[in-house]
Image: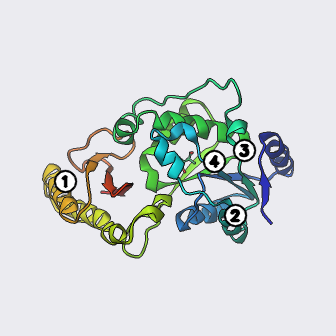
Amino acid sequence: MTQVIRTSAELRARVAAWKRSGMLVGVVPTMGALHDGHLSLVAEARKQSDRVIVTIFVNPMQFNNPSDLEKYPRDEGHDLALLEAAGVDVLFAPGVDEVYPEGFSTKITVSGVSEPLEGAFRPGHFEGVATVVAKLFGMTQAGRAFFGEKDWQQLQVVRRLVTDLNIPVRVIGCPTIREADGLAMSSRNVRLSPEDRAIAPALPAAMERAAAAMRAGTPVAEALETARAEIAAAGLGPIEYLDLRHAESLAPASDLNAPARMLAAVWLGDVRLIDNIAV
Ligand code: PAF
């Protein structure tokens, strides 16, 4: 039975009782609209922790676009049923006033890693993410936190945050879960029209081809240019970025001499797809 908790005071009491019995607590922070990608994080959290909390909070501070916030899919009843079936102990679903009470005035800026890519196209997004994640760590007091590699840059920002602020949580990145045709699972995919859904897998397919070309010796810039042309030819766009970066710092990478990641953000209709792969 998954217990639904809405206040941090109640959550703190529940977690304190677990910790008194020596239990290791894992948290999976989410914004709801759960899919198999989230459930894979829950499964990993269950393997690596004695008790699992899933948080659902659609964080207004990380939406730079008010209509994206408004359109963000929400279905707590359905999410709760999935969490029950997955054996989650607590769903922590606070309201906006619980997270940002009257007078709230703190924002956390993680410089460097949060500046390019998503940071450049979504001003303020990572301040919102870093602030709410730090709050969720404080509220849940979890020892382990599970994040999807689908949001690769977010994962690097959270790792930096935890290191810089000495937050006592171990951050665990889990692989992206994909549909059978290669499209990365995302809560926003439900907003794709059937026509757009059919062409969306062209994005990961072009990225995989570019990665294979780079590994085979094609210059990085040339492989990226071919991928951009293929993505546009498939009917996706505009492309906000498709780039090769150093996997951790996200500084530009022009060769494969150090661990590299290819990252993309591409519009399809009014849905913004993001994806990334190791190269
Ligand atoms: O990845 C998400 O769903 C969100 O950015 C997170 C980490 C739950 C913070 O709101």
Task: Report how far apart the C-alphas of labels 4 and 2 lie in the structure.
Answer: 14 Å
**Residue marked by disc 4:** 57
Q: Position of residue 64 (x, y in %)?
A: 46, 38
In this picture the colour scheme is rainbow
Q: Position of residue 130 (x, y in %)?
A: 54, 36
Q: Position of residue 198 (x, y in %)?
A: 33, 72
Indicate if the residue with disc 4 has its beta carbon within 8 Å of ligand 1: yes
Task: Report how far apart the C-alphas of labels 2 and 3 lie in the structure.
Answer: 22 Å
Q: Which mark is residue 224?
A: 1
Q: Quadrant of residue 162?
A: top right
Q: Amino acid at mark 1?
A: Leu
Q: Position of residue 150 (x, y in %)?
A: 44, 56
Which tag, 4 or 2, sits closer to the chain's start? Answer: 4
Q: Amino acid at mark 4?
A: Phe
**Residue marked by disc 3:** 140
Which tag, 4 or 3, sits closer to the chain's start? Answer: 4
Which tag, 3 or 1, sits closer to the chain's start? Answer: 3
Q: Amino acid at mark 3?
A: Thr
Q: Quadrant of residue 181?
A: bottom left
Instruction: Please name whichever residue, 34 or 209, is drawn nearer the observer in this view of the structure.
Output: 34
